[in-house]
């Protein structure tokens, strides 16, 4: 029974020869000539996809990207204790990263559309799911590389691990001068690289790839110690990072459950929410539309947070309307740093319409009082093109009733004074 189960999960079944796998891995590390051009074009395509918020274009760019080569190479190098391969992989990964940042930076610098779309914003901060995707995606990729029949997982791995979009987002952050976007996206890219590398290392060890042999025992011992230290440097911070991201995710879920059960379900309208996970103590700031909490109610809510595993967390409900308004405006200003193109268009249209609009409510009332015989009538403003480079605005008054000449002159003089214009045209409708 156990032997049958083992056969189902035996990774050695269908495995390519180890020498052939290593040869393929080494050949995909280098970024020279065609590989570098393909990477630059893929980054340009991904940047366009992020710019226009097209998921399909981003996926297409990830499919043609050769970026995983040096990361997998580094994982193999750690697994077989090949220091030279590790240095070569690290050097080529650095070259690929710098070229990718440069191409994306230049694209977004020259692009007229610099609004932060949802696909861009999704790559500015990592979460626990990014760690899991990178790790399991890396496992699938390495397993596929070690097979005789490569199958179809490689394109899926290229999409799932999503190495390119964070790099493009980092270039976008540089282009618009937003350092938080740059470091957030670069942080996500680094996480993906680390966990793909770790998953590669684990599979190499599991499949028992032989360590490289050295002639000099002292050099072998030195390189073994160096690579062991590098493995620990990668594993320990990465494990802590994964744990920290998991704790932050759990904290956010507990906060949402607490707010839902204890506040919004009771009919209180939430208008402001801000959580600070990294503060000491952790902090939840809330504000509500019309509910004012007494001291006893605040104490009761703080006590209930223990039930939702929100220990060492301070609940602050903002009830000072002046300070709250300033904070909300500041938050809105921060989140609206880039005005949407549609908003700009709407503003321009409003400005153009205002040139034709008459603010004439008061004026019409005065006309009704001074010239009651004029009704019905209409008063408007129209652009008149005098020549190719010259235009002016004329005011038109269209009426159908009988208006005596002296009354017409009085109305004309009065309107010129009121509207501060020399041009009033009277049109008699039939």
Image: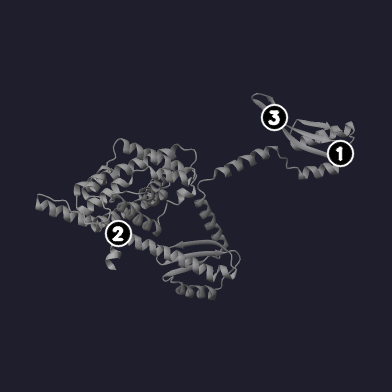
- Looking at the image, residue 283 sits to the left or right of residue 94; the answer is right
Name the spot of residue 86 as percent of width and height, x first: 23, 48
Number of callouts in the render?
A: 3
Residue at numbered disc 3: 392
Look at 33% across and 51% down and name the residue there: 141
- When asked about the image quadrant of residue 31, the answer is top left
Circle 3 SS class = strand
Q: Earlier in the sequence, mark 1 or mark 2?
A: 2
Q: Nearer the viewer, residue 371 or 114?
A: 114
Q: In this view, does 418 lie above or below 188?
A: above
Circle 1 SS class = helix
Of tags 2 and 3, the one toward the viewer is 2
- Looking at the image, residue 423 sits to the left or right of residue 284; the answer is right
Residue at numbered disc 2: 237
Task: Measure the C-alpha gap from mark 1 to mark 2.
Answer: 84 Å
Residue 303 is tagged as: none
Q: Quadrant of the N terminus?
A: bottom left
What kind of colouring is applied to the model shown?
Answer: one colour
Confirm whether residue 423 shows in the render: yes
Q: In which quarter of the image is the C terminus?
A: top right
Q: Is residue 94 above or below residue 287?
A: above
10 Å crowding of disc 3: few (<14), some (14-19), many (20+): few
Confirm whether residue 177 shows in the render: no
Residue at numbered disc 1: 374
Q: In this view, does 400 lie above or below 270?
A: above
Name the spot of residue 378 as percent of width and height, x first: 80, 38
Look at 72% across and 33% down and name the residue there: 382
Q: Which of marks 3 and 1 is nearer the N terminus?
A: 1
Look at 61% across and 40% down and name the residue there: 348
Whether tag 3 and tag 1 are in contact, CB under 8 A, the answer is no
Circle 2 SS class = helix
């Amino acid at each position: 029974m156990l032997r049958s189960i083992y056969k189902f999960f035996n990774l050695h079944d269908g495995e390519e020869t180890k020498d052939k796998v290593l040869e393929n891995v080494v050949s995909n590390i280098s970024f020279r000539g065609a590989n570098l051009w393909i990477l630059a074009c893929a980054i340009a395509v991904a940047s366009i996809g992020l710019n226009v918020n097209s998921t399909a274009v981003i996926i297409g760019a990830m499919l043609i990207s050769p970026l995983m080569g040096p990361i997998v190479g580094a994982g193999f190098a750690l697994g077989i204790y090949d220091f030279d391969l590790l240095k070569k992989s690290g050097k080529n990964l650095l070259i690929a990263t710098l070229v990718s940042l440069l191409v994306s930076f230049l694209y977004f610098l020259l692009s007229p559309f610099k609004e932060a779309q949802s696909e861009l914003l999704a790559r500015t901060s990592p979460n626990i799911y990014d760690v899991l995707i990178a790790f399991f995606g890396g496992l699938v990729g390495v397993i596929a590389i070690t097979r005789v029949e490569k199958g179809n997982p490689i394109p899926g791995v290229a999409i799932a691990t999503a190495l390119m979009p964070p790099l493009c987002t980092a270039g976008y952050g540089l282009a618009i001068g937003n350092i938080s976007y740059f470091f957030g996206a670069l942080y996500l890219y680094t996480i993906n690289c680390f966990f793909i590398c770790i998953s590669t290392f684990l599979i190499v060890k599991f499949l028992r790839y032989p360590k490289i042999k050295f002639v000099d025992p002292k050099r072998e011992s030195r390189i073994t110690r160096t690579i062991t230290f590098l493995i620990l440097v990668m594993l320990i911070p990465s494990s802590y990072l994964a744990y920290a991201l998991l704790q932050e995710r759990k904290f956010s879920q507990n906060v949402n459950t607490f707010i839902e059960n204890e506040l919004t379900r009771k009919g209180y309208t939430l208008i402001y929410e801000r959580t600070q996970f990294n503060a000491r103590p952790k902090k939840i700031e809330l504000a509500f539309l019309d509910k004012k909490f007494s001291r006893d109610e605040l104490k009761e809510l703080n006590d209930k947070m223990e039930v939702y595993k929100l220990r060492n967390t301070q609940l602050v409900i903002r009830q000072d309307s002046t300070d709250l308004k300033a904070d909300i405006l500041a938050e809105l200003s921060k989140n609206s740093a880039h005005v949407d193109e549609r908003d700009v268009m709407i503003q321009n249209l409003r400005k153009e319409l205002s040139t034709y609009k008459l603010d004439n409510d008061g004026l019409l009332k005065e006309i009704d009082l001074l010239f009651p015989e004029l009704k019905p009538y209409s008063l408007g403003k129209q652009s008149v093109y005098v020549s190719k480079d010259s235009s002016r605005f004329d005011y038109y008054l269209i009426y159908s009733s009988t208006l005596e000449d002296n009354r017409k002159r009085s109305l004309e003089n009065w309107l010129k004074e009121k509207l501060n214009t020399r041009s009033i045209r009277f049109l008699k409708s039939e």
